[in-house]
Amino acid sequence: MSLTSDTPVLIVGAGPVGLSLALDLGWRGIHAQLIEAGDGRIEHSKIGHIAVRTMEFFRRWHIASAVREAGFPDDFRMSRVICTDISRAPLFVDAHPSLRDMPVPSYACEKKQRCPQNWLQPILQQAVAQQPTITVRNHAQLLKFEQQADCVLATVRNSATQAESHIRARYLVACDGVDSSVREAMHIPMQGTPKLSYSIGITVRVPQWTQHCHYGQAERFIFLGPEGTWGNLTTVDGANLWRLTVHGNQNKLDLATFDPASWVRRALGHTDVDFEIMAVLPWRRREQTAARFGEGRILLAGDAAHAMSPTGGMGMNTGVGDAVDLGWKLAAMIEGWGGPHLIDSYEIERKPVAIRNAVSSTDNFKVLTSPANCSAILDDGVEGDNARSRISASFAAAMQARYWDPSGIQMGYRYDDSPICIPDGSPAPPDQAKYVQTARPGARAPHAWLADGRSTLDLFGRDFTLLRFPEARQQAVDDLVAAAHLRNVPLSVHTLTDAGIAQLYASPLVLVRPDGHVAWRGNDVNKGDAIRIIDTARGATS
């Protein structure tokens, strides 16, 4: 069988993470092939929460508006309600406004959004299809692969025609999910807790749910019974489509004896409400991270590299962060200016973030599933009233102590120990729930609005970016530009005169990587320092 195609990057799996990586590479003008074993359609919508940082990446790729306009009503209130069923008065309400009424955070140029995967997937697919350097092949199953010194050879079968073909790629990136066949073939183990619990997701359409809901609009209803937390009902489309998750334990739930309709009726609190069950999907809640995020020219991203509880909505958002970190590094290697240690920095930077986010997601899950004694929660009379009051107070305290979707987790991840970021001697700020912007090397470069209406984040992306403030010495700028030119590193220079932005960045010179993280900042450089800075940032030094 002869070789049929060559590609710089082969992406396996066309879910949101694989599509995001393909989109980032295409946006950079890098050729890649994206193969997907299925037909690209989504049967079970598992994603709802699009984090602020992910929306900033979508802004970069010019799809943020499409995501906002996908169909989720902007006047739907985003509260979280603790209750026994939706027909009864809540035990506790974690009140949140609608997306329309949520202000854009002061630290960001975008705000979070709700967009289920069956809406998000076509947006990403369309954006990828518009990239002339990206080829997408559905019904393409990866049969086997072999890593060689200068490439990866992959054999792919078309499931429709059964025809097999070879693809030779400089890099292969596995975005093929939590049960990644690529990861398993490489014998890379998953580390952590493989079974937090088993659950069953029921996608259900309830046309008249508002007529039977005591509280009204809410993003999520969390259900308690005498046994404790037994499930939650989460809006999919902000209208009539919901996802009911029934919690199990560390033992698998038996679908043969599982009655989804009875659980829907329990959630609704009525036996006479019309509803239609659209899908029933068993799944396992985990907290795991791959022991390695790749070997040589084969890399893991998204759920192939990490699996976490959906409580907090960090799974897909963490995966998109993987794609952005990896996209510019693959581009640098393919274009020839990336150093021999650049790809190695991917795992060093992203694995600690994955572990951190997975732990945070598990902590969210524990808050929801560890209420006070609920044995009397449905009782009438004084005993039942006291039980409900006690449980309400317990949840209020837990929710106040534990931010559900903390800005610090979403925005504050830093690459403090990265070999391609150059420490400036400043102390590391605490990794906390509330995000505080910092331009310390390794951190996301801060957002601020420019006089022309753009964000500072709009300056970053395809190239390294050198921000120069009024105190910067011209010769230092010239030396950094010359060093980048010497190493063929793409570099753009922007002069910013706003005193507030200068104070936010806290140095006359700040070098920002293509992914928007700070590589270096300082007061001055000479020619030798400039070359060292550029070589470090492009992964040329060990």
Image (cartoon, rainbow, N blue to C red):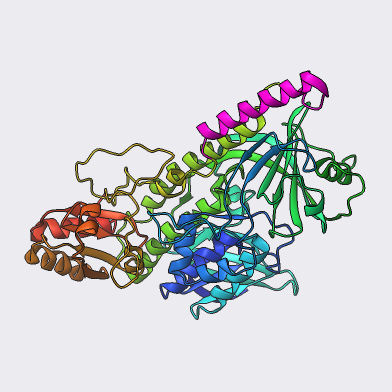
Report x, y in % for residue 162: 74, 71
Check residue 250 for magenta coloring: no
Residue 301 can be seen in this image? no
Residue 533 can be seen in this image? yes
User: In the image, 192: left or right of 508?
Assistant: right
Looking at the rendering, which quadrant does residue 459 occupy?
bottom left
User: In the image, 363: left or right of 219?
Assistant: left
Q: Is residue 539 above or below residue 168?
A: above
Check residue 376 for magenta coloring: yes
Q: Residue 519 versus residue 313: which sits nearer the camera?
A: 313
* Residue farthest along the right direction in this orientation: 272
Q: Residue 147 versus residue 94: which sits nearer the camera?
A: 94
Q: Residue 426 versus residue 380: which sits nearer the camera?
A: 380
Looking at the rendering, which quadrant does residue 197 occupy?
top right
Report x, y in % for residue 36: 64, 66
Report x, y in % for residue 11: 54, 64
Looking at the rendering, which quadrant does residue 122 occupy?
bottom right
The prevailing secondary structure element of the residues shown in magenta is helix
Residue found 42% across the figure and 76% down from its top = 29
User: In the image, 362: left or right of 278?
Assistant: left
In magenta, the rendered stretch is: 374-403
* Residue farthest along the front direction in this orientation: 382
Residue found 50% across the figure and 64% down from its top = 21
Report x, y in % for residue 419: 29, 48
